[in-house]
Image (tube, rainbow, N blue to C red):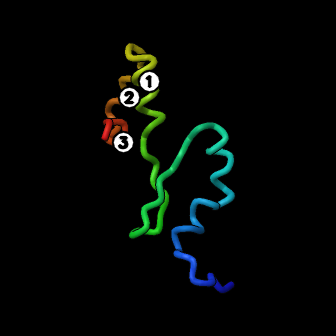
Amino acid sequence: MNAGGAPLFSYYPNFNELDRYNRQGITFLFDAQAKRFRYDGEGWQELARRYPKSPEAAEARKRPESTPK
């Protein structure tokens, strides 16, 4: 299939296997250099913010992607 001059990164956000995650509010960022999707950790941040005393929040705070940028 010929891309027709469109940049490669423009195809990745339309990857249909991400639809189920998008519907749940889970978003991924596209790393153009690595040509990969990356989870930004927003869900972990929200869990720690909403339920700060839960065991799950303690686990979320251990994850490097859960630290705000």
Question: Rounded to the nearest whole Å, what is the CA distance between mark 3 and mark 1?
Answer: 15 Å
In the displayed structure, 52 sits above or below 13; it is above
- Crowd rating for badge 1 (residues with CA inside 10 Å; few <14, some 14–19, many 20+): few
**Of the residues under marks 2 and 3, which one precedes in the sequence?**
2
- The CA distance from mark 2 to mark 3 is 12 Å
Residue drawn at point x = 59 percent, y = 68 percent: 11
Q: Which mark is residue 59?
A: 2
Report the Cα–Cα distance between label 2 and label 1. 5 Å
- Amino acid on which the number 1 mark rests in the picture: Glu
Return the residue nearer the eye: 58 or 51. 51
**The N terminus lies in which quarter of the figure?**
bottom right
Residue at 59%, 38% in the rendered image = 25
Image quadrant in which you'd find residue 60: top left
Please state, as top left, top right, bottom left or bottom right, where the C terminus lies in the image: top left
Residue bearing the label numbered 3: 65
Label 1: which residue?
56
Q: Earlier in the sequence, mark 3 or mark 1?
A: 1
Question: How far from the left and from the top, in percent, is residue 26?
Answer: 56, 41
- Vertical side of 4 occupied by 67: above or below: above
Residues at badges 3 and 1 in contact (C-beta under 8 Å)? Answer: no
* Badge 2 vs badge 1, beta-carbon distance below 8 Å: yes
Secondary element at image label 2: helix
- x%, y% of residue 65? 36, 42
- The local crowd at label 2, few if under 14, some if 14 to 19, many if 20 or more residues have their Cα within 10 Å, is few
Question: Position of 18 compared to 59: left or right?
Answer: right
